[in-house]
Image: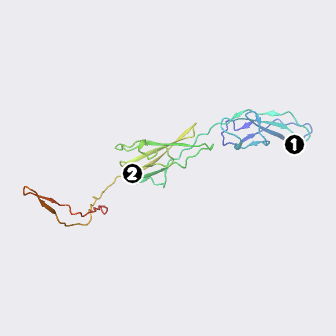
Amino acid sequence: LLQPNTPSASDTLSAAATGWSDADGDDENYDYQWFLNGAAITGANTSDLSSSYTAVGDEIYVTATPNDGIDLGAALTSNVVTITNTAPVADAATLDGTTEVTQCDTIYLDGSGSSDPDGDALSYQWSFASQPSDSNLSSSDFDAETDMQPTLVPDAAGTYSVQLAVSDGSESDLDTVDIEVAILTSNNDPVADAGSDMSGSGLALCSEDSSYGWTCAFCSGDTYVLDGSASR
């Protein structure tokens, strides 16, 4: 008999042979041989089989041959078990653990705590399970909604329940993190600074035309560099 009956790729398989009898009263002992998809596994000769030998979809069975140290009995063949997939585990969080921010702050989300017992690669999808009624955000407002660690800027005060879905390609899992966003209570007006005053002078070159009018060139050739970088 093999245990567990519905193993995953992370499980160690165990065989338990029963029905031993020996006319000489010799101690119970079995020689084991494990089989993977119908072929004997080299070196797999104990009552346990490590998960390192198996993958999702593999069919496994084992034979147990009674051995009293001199003679061998008739081999027993176990039931066949198929290695099944184990669902991943989603873990939605913020990168620094902060779940209380102010409106317009950047929220740094973190799904790196998600895992898969079988070691499968995971895909990520962030969305909103719920959000304030006056928020207009959607999944597209995450800077990268399929990344493990996206960012988000809330547009309204209230509670955002941010949902993470992780998938191993066969099964998925969901988790949420609630983030409280406080209203921005004050805002300072900006201050413009155009830089220091500048002045210049130059001669205007004028010439009289035949109708006693004058034509003057007023450009002096001076160059002025404007600078507003001191504004705040």
Determine whether, in the image, residue 199 is placed left or right of residue 171.
left
Residue 10 numbered tag: none
x and y percent of residue 91 in the render?
53, 47
Determine whether, in the image, residue 97 is placed left or right of residue 231.
right
Label 1 sits on a secondary structure element that is loop
Q: Residue at x 83, y 40 (%)?
A: 31
What is the crowding at mark 1: few (fewer than 14 residues within 10 Å), some, or many (at least 20)? few
Q: Amino acid at mark 2?
A: Val
Label 2 sits on a secondary structure element that is strand
Q: How many angstroms separate mark 2 from mark 1 (CA)?
A: 71 Å
Quadrant position of residue 85: top right
Which residue in the structure is indicated by mark 2? 181
Q: Amino acid at mark 1?
A: Asp
Determine whether, in the image, residue 52 is placed left or right of residue 159.
right
Q: Residue at x 37, y 44 (%)?
A: 132
x and y percent of residue 170 in the render?
58, 36
Which residue is farthest front? 210
What is the crowding at mark 2: few (fewer than 14 residues within 10 Å), some, or many (at least 20)? many
x and y percent of residue 94 in the render?
48, 51
Colour scheme: rainbow
Q: Residue at x 40, y 54 (%)?
A: 101
Query: Eyeballing the image, is 162 above or below 223?
Result: above
Q: Residue at x 40, y 44 (%)?
A: 131
Which residue in the structure is indicated by mark 1? 27
State which tag comes first along the sequence, 2 or 1. Answer: 1
